[in-house]
Image: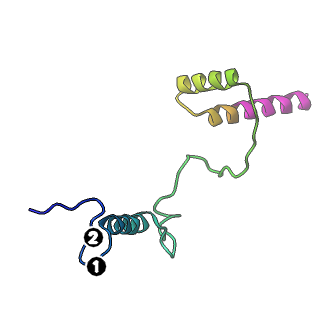
Amino acid sequence: MTTIAPYSTNRANKPVVVLYENLVNELVRYLFMARRGGNPDFGTKYRFDNGRSEPLSEQVKAQVHPDIKRQLKDLADQENCTIPDLIREAIEQYLASKQTTQAS
């Protein structure tokens, strides 16, 4: 029975560690490299449906105090939704109330 030391050589006189590293690099390249032509099913088979008739395409960013974020997270957990859903709903209610006060 023969044992191979970590830095022993094989028939090609390359260290076994180098061969192992080459094998790992090839596996990583194979598993995690993007497909050259892209994913043909990306926009059809893997489409994300958020249940809205119009897509959300614009972003708004606001910085808040950590306590407010914690309160929003707790409220989102109670309502079983996300923080952005709460903020969208609050903005819609605010804009609707502004429109009704301006109309009267």
Q: Element type at marker 1?
A: loop
Residue 73, given in percent of the width and then of the height, sits at: 60, 26
> How would you rate the neighbour count of disc 1 (Cα within 10 Å): few for under 14, some for 14-19, many for 20 or more?
few
Instruction: Please name the amino acid that badge 2 sits on.
Output: Thr
Is residue 80 found left or right of 28 in the rendered image? right
Is residue 91 found inside the magenta-colored segment of the image? Answer: yes
Dominant SS in magenta:
helix
Range of residues picked out in magenta: 90-104
Is residue 29 found inside the magenta-colored segment of the image? Answer: no
Residue 56, given in percent of the width and then of the height, sits at: 67, 49
Q: Are marks 1 and 2 in contact (CB under 8 Å)?
A: yes
Q: Nearer the viewer, residue 18 or 78?
A: 18
Figure check: 26 above or below 62: below
Q: Which residue does the numbered mark 1 point to in the structure image?
A: 12
Residue 76, given in percent of the width and then of the height, sits at: 58, 27
Instruction: Please name the amino acid that badge 1 sits on.
Output: Ala
Figure check: 52 above or below 18: above
Q: Nearer the viewer, residue 80 or 35?
A: 35
Q: Which of the image's four quarters has the C terminus?
A: top right
* Quarter of the figure with residue 71: top right
